Image (tube, helix red, strand yellow):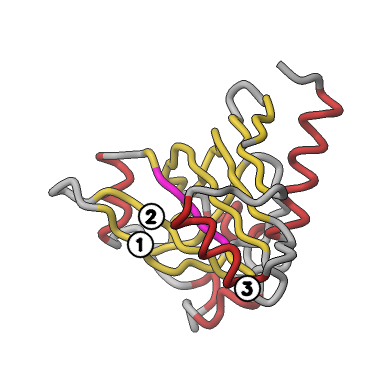
Amino acid sequence: MTNKPERQQVIDTLRGLIDNIRHAMLVTTDSEGQLRSRPMCTAGHKFDGDIWFVTCADDPKVGEIAAHPQVNVCYGSPTHDDFVSLSGSAEIVKDRKKIEALWNDHLNDWFPDGFETPNLALIRVDVHEAEYWKHHSRGMKGMVRSLFTKRIAEDHERITWEEHAAIST
């Protein structure tokens, strides 16, 4: 198990990778056990082990999360060759003050009435595990090749968040 400074280093590394990426793909499990993925705009919160999204409380993903809270969040910045996969458990939070506090201008593209949009809710993802690929010297083509050949680039790391222990693969 790592100590607090190491845990903070992991958080800082992940924050640095995802901080400037506006959209992520949120993956949930539907009522038939199938994975569903959709783009989400990250709410205005600096990553500290949790990721926040704004949604409509009656959206199907809310029911999916209630039934199957395990989710995956994927960020990608192909221009910088940075890719992050975060796994954890999600919960729905209905708190208007928190919605207002987390609001950012990018969310206006999704909710034209702003944080005054009726029936808004938050999705909080408590991250348990993260995996990232950073600054691939071989570029996108090399990264895709490594996915199919099972050869992992040396700048790849998998972090088991519950234990806060880094596992290099």
> Disc 1 or disc 3, which is closer to the eye?
3
Residue type for callout 2: Val
Snapshot quadrant of residue 60: bottom left
Callout 3: 10 Å neighbours few (<14), some, many (20+)?
few
**Residue at image location 45% in from the left, 72% down from the top:** 117
Q: Nearer the viewer, residue 167 or 64?
A: 167
Callout 1: 10 Å neighbours few (<14), some, many (20+)?
some
Q: Residues at badges 2 and 1 in contact (C-beta under 8 Å)? A: yes
Dot 1 or dot 3, earlier in sequence: 1
Residue 80: image tag = none
The Cα atoms of the two marked residues, 2 and 3, are separated by 20 Å
Q: Position of residue 30 (x, y in %)?
A: 22, 51
Residue 37: image tag = 1
Q: Nearer the viewer, residue 3 or 57?
A: 3
Q: Position of residue 145 (x, y in %)?
A: 52, 63
Residue 78: image tag = 3
Q: Is residue 90 above or below residue 77?
A: above
Residue type for callout 1: Ser
Q: Assess whether residue 15 is covered by the magenta stretch.
A: no
Q: Nearer the viewer, residue 106 or 37?
A: 37
**Residue at image location 59% in from the left, 45% down from the top:** 131
Task: Determine whether, in the image, residue 135 is placed left or right of residue 56.
Answer: right
Q: Secondary structure at mark 2?
A: strand
Magenta-drawn segment: 71-75
Q: Secondary structure at mark 1?
A: strand
Residue type for callout 3: Pro
Dot 2 or dot 3, earlier in sequence: 2
Q: Position of residue 7 (x, y in %)?
A: 77, 30
Magenta stretch, main secondary structure class: strand
The Cα atoms of the two marked residues, 1 and 3, are separated by 19 Å
Report the residue marked by disc 2.
27
